[in-house]
Image: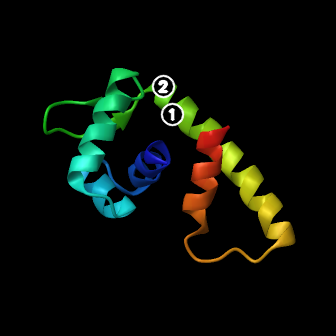
Amino acid sequence: MYLLTIKNLAVNKHVIKSVDVARDMNYSRASVHKMLASLKKINYIQQERYGSIKLTASGSRAASAYLKKYKIIEDALKDVVELPEGYNLGICNLIELM
């Protein structure tokens, strides 16, 4: 979900900061900082200390693969049930179990 958030923020903003990710996801800055450090370790993002965040090529591929899974699940669910508000987190949790 973090990768998708960064990807979506990049569409509208040239400079993405961790505070932007925290605000968009409604997560604490500390939680976001910890996850961004993990994403940086696996080379999904580039981030200078206190600097802007950018997806790497592998991070962009991972975000696209995640989005594809998300859309498949979302479309399948929409065919059989009315999705409640906040359903996206449930779909993300399901993808994490895959």
- In the image: residue 20, left or right of residue 78: left
Residue at the far front in the pictured view: 97
Please report contact status of discs 2 and 1: CB closer than 8 Å, yes or no. yes
Specify the quadrant of the image occupied by residue 48: top left
Check disc 2 and report the residue beneath it: 57
Name the residue: 34% across, 30% down.
38
Q: CA distance from mark 2 to mark 1?
A: 5 Å
Q: Is residue 49 left or right of residue 47?
A: left
Local crowd size for mark 2, using a 10 Å CA cut-off: few (<14), some (14–19), many (≥20): few
* Residue 91 on image: x %, y %: 63, 56
Looking at the picture, how far across and down is residue 28, in whole percent? Answer: 25, 57
At x 33%, y 27%, the residue is 40
Instruction: List the residue tagged with mark 1.
Output: 60
Indicate the position of residue 73 as horizontal and vertical percent values: 75, 54
Instruction: Name the quarter where the C terminus is drawn.
Output: top right
Question: Which color scheme does this rendered protein use?
Answer: rainbow
Q: Amino acid at mark 2?
A: Ala
